[in-house]
Image: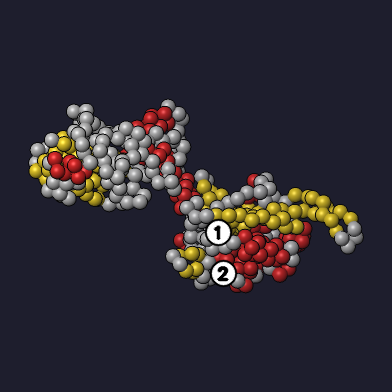
């Protein structure tokens, strides 16, 4: 009696493995052709493994609760000589005679003639690493409170470089030997936001801006506005003139913002808070100073009202306060834009009117943006308009 292998089928273009949930027949049971033999769970749905032909269910190699790659031999069906010839089974395949906890893996031919997969099954070319997680793996990660990003540093030994349960457990045992501290709720919230932000194609453009006029304006201003507020007001005015760069791509449409609400980053304990100034394009700089100062103080105390957070279309951050000249900050998940400003430095500037170099204070400004919505040209024009306003602060 010939044996036809029961193979883990290709259950979808991006499915590399599945977990056995239930075996629907017992060894020795007669099975009709195309009968559902097993239920398996992928990372997308519960599906069935069907019988390749009619016969008697022979040995079942797969175990419930275990994950197997596409093409793995899960068991055998005893078939008639006629079906054996039709399937190309000229002789009874060799088996180990015992159940296996995990079946070795190898790409299956169009008509399977070998019951055991001995090599590594490749996953699709666009996938790799921790992109493919078995239900068992996902359950263990949920138990440990881990996310996909936490697996990025684990070298996977599974098919296509996937991280296996054994890889994860070995990694976790190594962590336990190191010093650890619990992440604060704010740190975890920031991490979550950055993971969601990074799922988009982000890009950054840079531009130096001469700050002398701004610094002179600030020095003479009775309320001494902070440099970040100047940048916020300039960005708000630029977006008030044309809000398209702040639109969000939702499906196949660009959704334009109903109002120019600009956030600004404030460092607070173990993270960053982003208070929001609503309708920032409708108020002159003088009117924004007290509102800005109030929100900064509330953010540092972590007492921001709900009405003053969330829903902004862009953010301004002054990383120059840490002595940084250049950085590539990441916009929040619900935003398309983020303006960053570096520390001001005195540099030589060629003045063609007098044909001499003069010392000026220059700061590097960056505009990070969602590249699905903006291209480099549009981002450059927006940053140019911000520069024009900052270099002539009387307009603000």
Residue 131: x and y, percent?
A: 40, 45
Placement of the C terminus among the 4 image quadrants: bottom right
Q: Work out whether residue 88 or residue 218 is closer to the camera in this orientation and state it.
A: 88
Point out residue 382 in the picture as x, y percentages from the top left corner.
Answer: 64, 64
In this image, 329 relative to 77: left or right?
right
Q: Secondary structure at mark 2?
A: helix
State the image quarter where residue 116 is shown.
top left
Task: Find residue 95 and name its label.
Answer: none
Residue at horizontal 64%, vertical 63%? Answer: 377
Residue 94, given in percent of the width and then of the height, sits at: 22, 30
Tag count: 2
Q: Count residues near mark 1 (Cα–Cα under 10 Å), then give few for <14, some for 14-19, many for 20+.
A: some
State the SS at label 1: loop
Q: Residue at x 21, y 30 (%)?
A: 95
Q: Gap between marks 1 and 2, in whole Å?
A: 13 Å
- Badge 2 crowding class, 10 Å Cα cut-off, few under 14, some 14 to 19, many 20 or more, is some
Above or below 86: residue 278 = below
Mark 1 or mark 2: name the one nearer the start of the chain: 2
Asked whether the viewer can see residue 330, the reply is yes
Q: Quadrant of residue 145?
A: top left
Circles 1, 2 touching at the beta carbon (< 8 Å): no
Mark identifier at residue 244: 2
Residue at x-position 69% and y-position 50%: 343
The quadrant of the rendering that contains the N terminus is top left
Q: Residue at x 44, y 48 (%)?
A: 126
Q: Is residue 395 above or below residue 68?
A: below
* Residue that mark 1 sits on: 371
Q: Nearer the viewer, mark 1 or mark 2?
A: 1
């Amino acid at each position: 009696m010939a044996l036809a292998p029961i193979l883990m089928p290709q259950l979808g273009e991006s499915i590399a493995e599945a977990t056995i949930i239930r075996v629907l027949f017992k060894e020795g049971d007669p099975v009709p052709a195309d009968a559902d033999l097993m239920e398996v769970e992928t990372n997308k749905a519960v599906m069935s493994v069907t019988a390749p032909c009619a016969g008697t269910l022979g040995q079942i190699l797969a175990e419930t609760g275990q994950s197997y790659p596409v093409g793995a031999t899960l068991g055998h069906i005893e078939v008639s000589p006629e079906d054996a010839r039709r399937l190309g089974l000229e002789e009874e395949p060799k088996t180990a005679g015992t159940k296996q906890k995990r079946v070795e893996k190898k790409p299956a031919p169009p008509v399977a003639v070998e019951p055991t997969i001995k090599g590594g099954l490749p996953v699709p070319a666009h996938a790799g690493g921790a992109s493919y997680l078995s239900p068992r793996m996902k359950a263990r990660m949920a138990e440990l409170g881990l996310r996909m990003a936490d697996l990025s540093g684990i070298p996977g030994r599974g098919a296509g470089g996937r991280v296996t349960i054994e890889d994860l457990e070995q990694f976790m045992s190594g962590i336990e030997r190191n010093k650890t501290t619990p992440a604060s709720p704010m740190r975890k919230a920031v991490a979550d936001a950055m993971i969601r932000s990074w799922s988009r194609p982000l890009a950054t453009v840079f531009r130096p801006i001469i700050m002398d006029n701004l610094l002179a304006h600030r020095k003479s201003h009775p309320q001494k506005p902070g440099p970040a507020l100047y940048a916020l007001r300039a960005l708000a005015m630029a977006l008030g003139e044309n809000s398209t760069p702040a639109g969000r791509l939702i499906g196949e449409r660009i959704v334009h913002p109903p109002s120019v609400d600009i956030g600004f980053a404030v460092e607070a304990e173990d993270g960053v808070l982003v208070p929001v100034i609503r309708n920032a394009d409708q108020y002159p700089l003088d009117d924004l100073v007290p509102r800005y100062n109030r929100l900064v103080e509330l953010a540092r105390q972590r007492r921001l009202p709900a009405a003053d957070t969330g829903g902004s279309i862009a953010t301004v951050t002054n990383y120059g306060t840490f002595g940084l000249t250049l950085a590539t900050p990441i916009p929040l998940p619900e935003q398309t834009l983020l303006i960053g400003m570096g520390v001001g430095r005195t540099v030589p500037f060629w003045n063609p009117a007098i044909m001499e170099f003069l010392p000026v204070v220059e700061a590097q400004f960056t505009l990070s943006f969602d590249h699905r919505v903006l291209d480099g040209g549009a981002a450059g024009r927006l940053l140019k308009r911000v520069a024009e306003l900052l270099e002539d602060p009387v307009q603000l």
